[in-house]
Structures are given as C-alpha cells and as structure tokens.
Image (cartoon, rainbow, N blue to C red):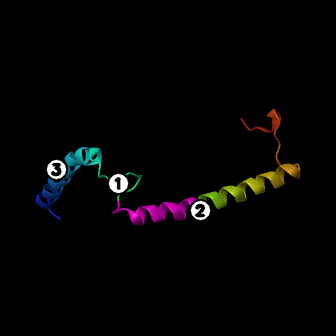
Amino acid sequence: MNMQTSAEIAAQDLHVDSLIPAGLRSRYAARGRYSWQEQAQRELNVWLVKRYRAEWENRKRATLGRTMQGGVNQSKEGIAG
C-alpha cells in the first residue's frame, strides 16, 4: 500500500469519525457497548471472559490448597525483600 492510498483511507476515516457524535445523539441509535458490525469482537470477549474466570477459579483453588497445607508463608519474615 502506498502513501497516497493510506492518506485517502485516513481521510475517509476522519470524515466518518467526525459524524459519529451526531449519530450517537440520534434517538434511533441502538444503545449498547458494541455496534451491530462488531459481533466478532463480542464473541471474542465472551470467549475470553469464560476462560479468564475459569483460570481465576483454578488459581484460587490452588492458592487455597497451599494455604490449607501450610505451604504459603504469610508472615513478614516470609516476604522476600
């Protein structure tokens, strides 16, 4: 892609970006976090959140297991510094 093409695309983006606030003020604008064109982004976020929550639970269980076994030293002497 050359510089001329990049400049044309950027100019189009700037024009569209300047119209967004007016569109959002419209009473017909759909409300929500995502545009109707961002379904893939929504699906990715749902996929990621599910995995983040599962990993969070796994780590909480692992930490709790070590704490119950006495494997986590919570005293000041146990903190490396």
User: Between residues 66 and 77, which one lies in front from this camera angle?
Assistant: 66
Magenta stretch: give its range.
Answer: 36-51
Relative depth, front residue between 38 and 70 = 38
Q: Position of residue 56 (x, y in %)?
A: 67, 55
Which residue in the structure is indicated by mark 2?
50
Q: Position of residue 43 (x, y in %)?
A: 47, 65
Q: Nearer the viewer, residue 44 or 68?
A: 44
Q: Secondary structure at mark 3?
A: helix
Left or right of residue 14: residue 79: right
Going by the image, does 33 lie left or right of 26?
right
Quadrant for the N terminus in the image: bottom left
Which residue: 63% across, 58% down?
Answer: 53
Residue 39 located within the stretch drawn in magenta? yes
Could you tell me residue 57's position as x and y percent? Answer: 70, 57
| SS class, disc 1 | loop
Say which quarter of the image contains residue 9.
bottom left
Question: Circles 2 and 1: CB distance less than 8 Å?
Answer: no
Q: Are marks 2 and 3 in contact (CB under 8 Å)?
A: no
* Amino acid type, residue under disc 3 in the picture: His
Q: Secondary structure at mark 2?
A: helix
In front: label 3 or label 1:
1
Q: CA distance from mark 3 to mark 1?
A: 21 Å
Q: Which residue is mark 1?
A: 30
Q: In the rendered structure, find residue 15 and report the number of the disc placed on it.
A: 3
Residue located 41% across and 52% down the image? 32
Residue 28 part of the magenta-drawn span: no
Residue 15 against residue 51 in the figure, above or below: above
Residue furthest toward the top?
76
Instruction: Tell me if mark 2 has few (under 14), some (14-19) or many (20+) residues whose alpha carbon lies within 10 angstroms of its own.
Output: few
- Residue furthest to the right in view is 69
